[in-house]
Each structure stands twice: as C-alpha cells, then as structure tokens.
Amino acid sequence: MASELIYRGHESQPLSDEYSPKPHKPWLSVTRPIRYLLLEQRLIFVLVGIAIATIFFTVVPSSRTSYTREYDPVPIPYFEHESTQWSHRPKYDYRLAVHSGGKVPLGIKRKGLRIVVTGGAGFVGSHLVDRLIARGDSVIVVDNFFTGRKENVMHHFGNPRFDLIRHDVVEPLLLEVDQIYHLACPASPVHYKFNPVKTIKTNVVGTLNMLGLAKRVGARFLLTSTSEVYGDPLQHPQKETYWGNVNPIGGYHFFLPLSHLVVIVSGDRNLATLHSLLSGSQRRISGVRSCYDEGKRTAETLTMDYHRGAGVEVRIARIFNTYGPRMCLDDGRVVSNFVAQALRKEPLTVYGDGKQTRSFQYVSDLVEGLIRLMEGEHVGPFNLGNPGEFTMLELAKVVQETIDPDAKIEYRPNTEDDPHKRKPDISRAKELLGWEPKVDLHKGLPLMVSDFRQRIFGDHKEASS
Ligand SMILES: O=c1ccn([C@@H]2O[C@H](COP(=O)(O)OP(=O)(O)O[C@H]3OC[C@@H](O)[C@H](O)[C@H]3O)[C@@H](O)[C@H]2O)c(=O)[nH]1
C-alpha cells in the first residue's frame, strides 16, 4: 500500500503503437526564418531599422541624470582639482554604478536609489525626504519621534517608495540601502540639554551604528554635523579649517523638579507637555552644550576614521542655524520662539542684551546643499549656512515687520555657554559644490508663518475641545 502511494510507475499504461510523433528536424528551425528573410526580401527592412536606431541613439543627446540638475537649473561647475587635505576621491565611482551620467535612451528613467534618512520625521529630515521622494528615490525614514513628528511625513503614507521605521539609532539596524543621510539627533539646545547623556550617546553610538551599516552594505554616508563644533568661536566668520573653541566639560544644573519628570514618548504633544511644565525661569533648562558640541565633534572623528580606515564613502556637513515650516513649536530656538510668540501676541523673549549674532538659513537651501554634498565628490566638511548675520534684536525687528509691528520685547538672562557670534564662511561650498543660499531672512520668514499659525491655533482648538 505504502509503496503504491509512493511509486505509481507500474500503473502507467504502455504507449499505444498508433501514436508516432513526427521526427524532429532541428535544422528546420534555423533555415526557415532565413529562407523567409531572403525570399520575401524582408532583410532590407531589418537593415534599414538597425541603421535608423543607430543614428537615433548617436545623434540625439543623452538624458543625463544628475540629481542636482533635476532640481536646480543652475549648472554645477566642474572642478578639475581636488583639495588634497580634506577631500578624497571615492575608491570607485559610486555614481557610475548607480546612476551613470552616460547615455540613457530617452524615455528610460534612471533607477531610483534606496536611501535611509535617520531623523527623517524631524524638521530638516522631512523636507529632505520630500525632495528625495519627489525625484523618484525609495526612502526609509528611521526616527524615534523624540523631536520628530509622524505628521511631518504622513503625506507619504501609501506611497510604495516610502517606509517609516520607529527606531532609535543607538540600537543597531540592518537595511539594504545605497545612501544614508544621518540626521538623527535633537538639535535645539532645550532638547539636547534635556538628557545630555542620551544626546552624546545618540551622536556617538548612533553614528557608530550608522557608519557600521554603511560599511556593511557599501552605502555612502552623510553626517549632519553642526556649527556648534566651532563652540564660542574666536575666528569670525568661521571657515571649515577652524578647529573651534569648545568647552568639553561643565557643571550641569537641572532646574526641572523631580515631580515634573516626564517620559518623552513622541512628537509635539509630549514636548508641549514638557514645555508647559517648565514655566517661567524653569522653562530654559540650564545645562551645557558640550553633550551636543562634543558629541558632534566625535561623530565627525568617527566618520573620518571609517573613511580613512575602512574605505567608507563619507560626507560631512556643518549646519548653521536653520528655520522653516515644521520646526518644532516652542523648541526654544530663537526663530521658532519669536514667530510663535508674535503669533500668540506674547512678548519676544530676547536673551542677554540681544547683541549676540547668528546666521539664519531657510530649510530649502539647506536641503539643496545636503543633496549636492551627497552627490558630489568631496568629503568635506562643508559649512552649510546663510552668511547673512543678524543680532537677536535685529531678528526681533524682522519678526515684528513680518508678523506683528506691536510685538513687545522682553529681556531675559542668557544661558551661560551661549556663543557670542556665528557666521559661516561658505566659500568652500560655493567653489566645490556650486552651492549658496538663495532665500534671505526677509523672504524666508513669511514662508513659515502660515504653518506655525495653523499648528498653533489648531493645537489651541484641540486643547480646548
Ligand atoms: O527665545 C529666545 C531663544 C534664543 N535666544 C538667543 O538666540 C540665539 C540663538 O539660539 P538658538 O537656540 O536658536 O540656537 P543656537 O545658535 O544657540 O544653537 C543652535 O546652533 C546651531 C544648530 O546646530 C542647533 O540648532 C543649535 O544648537 C542665542 O543667543 C539665544 O540665547 C533668544 O534671544 N531668545
């Protein structure tokens, strides 16, 4: 019985003698089409077709697929010479492998890249994701939602080229990708001073994990570092060659009473809870910047060591103060504070005498710079910032002009480690990336007002209901 189930060959019927398949003539399949071509004079049509196709692909210009050109008609200058000390030619030309600038027949699109953006649900990250998705790439956002918000990327839900992973970069992660934009880290002093050990862990362990991933899968890695690596600078404006003036240590004073300790889970709502608990003088957590400054400096070191030691293709951007829609509400940064205060008819809080300076860059300029850096051939570091320099009092004036001329100014004591001035020297980015900011403060500020208005008054409605 068992053998019957397994082997049924003995049940098969012998082939009938009547069935006799035609003998196979292999040469017929070759000779038939040739005879057809010759006899019916079809050969001439085949030859004419080949000639037309050859002429078409030779004469018609190729559709080059340079990302930056898709987004910006300004041509990127070609640089023959590479600076020897801080830029390295990649070991292999990654761009040739992935999206060759060679001839691509018209109508055939370049293959999209697979890109991971850590911190992609945050303010800068989400704008970057918009651009990458728009140009046809597949994007995986990795975010722990400490300061990032799902709302920033929700418009991509349902797009098959978009994925969102709730993940903290201090834990390892394995993904198959071509490029890694590493943005994950709280960027506002209020947020990164909130849990300084976590901040430095994010910058050191998080960056290590992402560099390890880049090495393992052969991806190109871009680190978003910061102008804070220059500390309280003794050089003005700051060039990339300046080593900075950072205090690596400092006492840490935490004004938040124990009873007010909250677990930050995700998004603006939780941050709003934190901010509502931090009222008055307690609102500004008095910590030190070293967790962020030194964390980013170490992240730069790690990035260069993976590049020199393990051959990972890396890029380093040093980002100066940036503003625009989707900034965290009430994140303590001066632009978001002033805009929110003016809209709420509250006084603009100027810390110190308001004569300290900063340079404010609109977010679309930064995104353009980041993409050019990633696609270019230079490691960096590159300053990405707007060289327009403003005192905080001048910034308050622009906010008054833009939102509410009657907005009052209220002076508050400054934080102990506040840099006195900051302004990028962007000649390196101009020369080697063909990049410079296009949106000045007077143009950019109005562009974030409607987003803030909608979120602030939307929030109010939600809260009252
Ligand atoms: O309400 C406010 C908030 C801030 N300020 C002042 O405005 C200046 C800018 O403060 P911000 O908090 O916006 O930003 P900072 O320049 O101090 O730090 C930023 O630097 C660059 C980025 O990497 C980070 O986003 C952040 O660390 C400081 O002098 C601060 O004292 C005010 O006068 N009023």
Image (spheres, grey):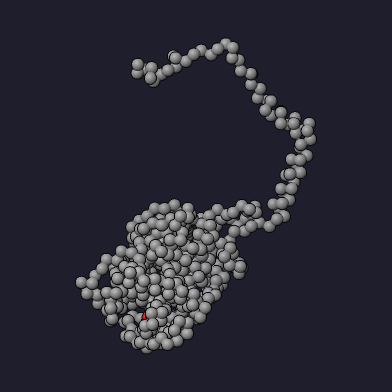
* Residue occupying image coordinates x 33% and y 64%: 266
Residue 395, position as x, y percentages in the image: 44, 83
In screen coordinates, is 361 left or right of 44?
left
Residue 1, position as x, y percentages in the image: 35, 16
Residue 226 image-quadrant placement: bottom left
Residue positioned most to the top: 17
* Residue occupying image coordinates x 36% and y 63%: 145
Number of numbered discs visible in the structure rendering: 0
* Residue occupying image coordinates x 38% and y 82%: 345
Closest to the observer: 186 or 90? 186
Closest to the observer: 376 or 165? 165
In screen coordinates, is 222 left or right of 465?
right
Give above or below for 309 relative to 435. Answer: above
Residue 10, position as x, y percentages in the image: 44, 14
Tell me the quarter of the image containing the C terminus: bottom left
Residue 113, position as x, y percentages in the image: 51, 55
**Ligand 1 in which quarter:** bottom left
Residue 125 in view here: yes
Residue positioned most to the front: 465
Give above or below for 440 relative to 160. Answer: below
Give above or below for 442 relative to 158. Answer: below
Residue 290 in view here: no
* Residue occupying image coordinates x 66% and y 22%: 25
Closest to the observer: 239 or 64? 64
Residue positioned most to the left: 259
Residue 460 image-quadrant placement: bottom left
